[in-house]
Amino acid sequence: MKFDDGSYRLVNNGKFGTVALTFGLVGLLACGIGYFFDSRQFFHSYLTALVFWVSISLGGLFFVMLHYLVGAKWSVVLRRLCENIMITIPLMALFSLPLMFGIHDLFHWSHPEAVSRDILLQGKAPYLNVPFFIVRTAIYFILWTLMARYLYNISLKQDRKHSEELFIRARRASAPGMILFGLTITFFAFDWLMSLDAHWYSTIFGVYFFSGAFLGCLAFLTVMILYFRKHHILDKSITVEHYHDLGKLMFAFTVFWGYMAFSQYFLIWYANIPEETIWFLHRWEGSWQTVTLFILFGNFLVPFFLLFPQWPKRNRFMLMAISVWILFVHWVDIYWIVMPSLHQHGINISWLDFAALAGIGGIFVWFFWNKLSSQALIPINDPGLAESIKFVNN
């Protein structure tokens, strides 16, 4: 892998993309085989993996829109990487298509005979029905794709020739885009995760999912820039000051995720309404209790105390370990949301869980890497680039 300091481009992108593609193809092949052995396990494992990688993509979109809205300077050198994370959204839309054939395996509300016997499902039928469900999913991915593609194209145009008008267009698009993003990610979480148990509901669930998604994206971004650092790529542009700020953001969203998780649990525990508490009860049965406690410690307490001091945020080895840990626990969190609908009395790990994660993830990383290596790794004509490179934490 070779990097040209003058053009900020990879002149030889090495074997990273090829290795990721190999993992992806092998994982997808294993998933295809696994479908014929246990279709219900396949669809639950596939949903877990898909939502995990979609959350990373959406985190990238949020980062880019937030960057434009606040006019941040420190994050200019990071924006191109986030743009290539968000541009994977159309790929994730393609990966969502197999799940359309597994709606009956995943969702109890999709069975007419179940609805006919359940007054609660009958009340939710105008919203929870298969045709409307598919239409909503298509709308989510179309809106995300349009937002990501628009901002991505503006950034590439800026590489050719800077224009203040391009920045204004990106900021103007990001304002309504942020509102649409908030609505769509919330309803996406309601549809694909919360409705797995259609008798349960939580108005805070969308924010809970968003906080974990952005935290996962920050961790993925940190892993990638530290991987570049190891190969002496962008090591003069993305400095320890940027690592420090990414560490601060991960710390902030660790606290935010913890606050959302606690608020959701506390309000439901305090009200003690059976149709609300049943969801947490399922996750306190058998070995799910261990997973619940692991998420409490792994997704909040461990990163909280590790990221609280200054030095781990400025130590690239420590920050890499924390970022990998956050990514792992983020996947466990989604697994904990999805799998009790299939295995209600205890965790039952399947090889399909890892095959789906590697299959979708391998193609995700390969696509991300190919897009990234086809252009400058930073927005070279952004007027805030020089200030971003020289950025120092106060």
Image: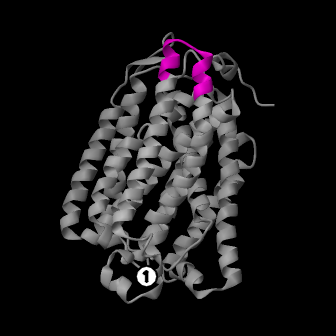
From where the camera sits, is residue 321 visible?
no
Is 314 left or right of 236, judged from the image as shown?
A: right
Give the residue at the far bottom of this rendering. Answer: 117
- Residue found at x 41% / y 45%: 142
Give the colouring mode of the picture: one colour
Quarter of image, res 13:
top left
Q: In which quarter of the image is the C terminus?
A: top right
Task: Depth check: give the residue in front, 44 or 99.
Answer: 99
- Give x and y (percent) for residue 180: 55, 48
From where the camera sits, is residue 326 visible?
yes
Q: Kindly report the secondary structure that dominates the magenta region of the rendered protein.
A: helix
- Give x and y (percent) for residue 286: 48, 83
Task: Depth check: give the residue in front, 305 or 190.
Answer: 190
Q: Mark 1 points at which residue?
A: 122
- Residue found at x 35% / y 26%: 14
Q: In which quarter of the image is the N terminus?
A: top left
* Magenta stretch bounds: 156-169
